[in-house]
Amino acid sequence: MCLAIPSKVIEIKDDSTVIVDTMGSKRLVSTMLLEERVNVGEYLLIHVGYAMQKIDEKEAMESLGLFKEIENKMNMG
């Protein structure tokens, strides 16, 4: 199973890399697989260091909410 995590673009490094914030962790991500240009503030689905696609903010927030819910339940057990 593959897991892609929504991440917010916080800095453009060059034509093929950006810095994203993934649930509070910042990391460098390749955008080589995307056909369109990305902008600061947009959300991307990230898998193993590559942006797979853009998603809208509403969808990103819903997904991140589910990840946080899972994390909270794991910390309880």
Image: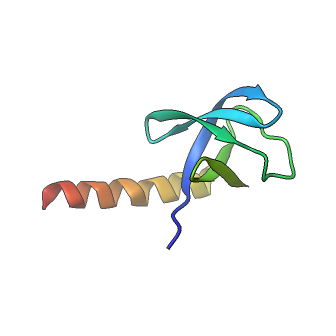
Give the residue drawn at x 69%, y 33%.
Answer: 18
What is the total number of numbered labels drawn onto the structure image? Answer: 0
Give the residue drawn at x 56%, y 51%.
Answer: 6
Q: Is residue 59 above or below residue 16?
A: below
In the figure, residue 17 lies in which quadrant?
A: top right
Of residues 68 and 25, the one drawn nearer to the viewer in this rendering: 25
Q: Is residue 43 above or below residue 72?
A: above
Question: Left of 75 or right of it: where is 51?
Answer: right
Residue 37 picture location, percent across and down = 84, 41
Q: Is residue 70 above or below residue 28?
A: below
Residue 74 in sight in this render: yes
Give the residue drawn at x 44%, y 42%.
Answer: 23
Give the image's coloring scheme: rainbow
Question: Left of 48 or right of it: where is 56?
Answer: right
Residue 72 picture location, percent across and down = 25, 54
| Name of the residue lying farthest toward the bottom | 1
Give the residue drawn at x 43%, y 35%.
Answer: 24
Residue 55 in sight in this render: no
Question: Left of 20 or right of it: where is 69?
Answer: left
Question: Left of 18 or right of it: where is 23?
Answer: left
In the figure, residue 74 lies in which quadrant?
A: bottom left
* Quadrant placement of the C terminus: bottom left
Residue 2 picture location, percent across and down = 53, 68
